[in-house]
Image: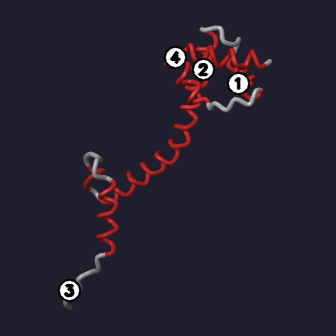
Amino acid sequence: MTRVPRGYIARRRRAKMRSFASNFRGAHLRLNRMITQQVRRAFVSSHRDRGRQKRDFRRLWITRINAATRIYKVFNSYSKLIHNLYKKELILNRKMLAQVAVSNPNNLYTISNKIKIIN
């Protein structure tokens, strides 16, 4: 019986998986089954951690704002600062507030004075 050359579809699929695994080490780089498993696992981790990263950064920003409000006596707590910001319709997200609190606390103090004056 003569030899039948197979198509390129499976080879193309494996090459695509291999391109995703180019930075892996050992058998995770060389063996097709291992490559498939590890790439799938990496995709699951990256998908899960995109949401986790958003949560972690939000927690970091809240912690920074809370620390700055307590250190510089802006308000007694983070929650009161955010409550007054919403009440006075000053639209500043937590990322911007955390950046202001870290880089220039005087501006945070100015923002809090604007809130208090409007009262």
Q: Is residue 33 left or right of residue 108?
A: left
Point out the tag, 1 or 4, that comes first from the N-terminus.
1
Between 11 and 88, the one lying in front of the other is 88
Identify residue for label 2.
65
Element type at mark 1: helix
Q: Quadrant of the C terminus?
A: top right
Q: Quadrant of the N terminus?
A: bottom left
Indicate how the structure is coloured in the image: secondary structure
- Local crowd size for mark 3, using a 10 Å CA cut-off: few (<14), some (14–19), many (≥20): few
CB under 8 Å between discs 1 and 2:
yes
Image position of 24 with respect to 73: above or below: below
Q: Residue at x 56, y 30 (%)?
A: 95
Q: Which numbered circle lies on residue 104?
A: 4
Point out the tag, 3 or 1, that comes first from the N-terminus.
3
Identify residue for label 1.
82
Of the residues shown, which amino acid type is indicated by label 1? Ile
Point out the tag, 1 or 2, that comes first from the N-terminus.
2
CB under 8 Å between discs 3 and 1:
no
Element type at mark 4: loop
Point out the tag, 3 or 2, that comes first from the N-terminus.
3
Image position of 100 with respect to 21: above or below: above
Q: Residue at x 69, y 14 (%)?
A: 113
Of the residues shown, which amino acid type is indicated by label 4? Asn
Q: Residue at x 56, y 13 (%)?
A: 106
Identify residue for label 3.
3
Find residue 13 and report its horizontal and vertical position in percent. 34, 68
Q: Which numbered circle lies on residue 40?
A: none
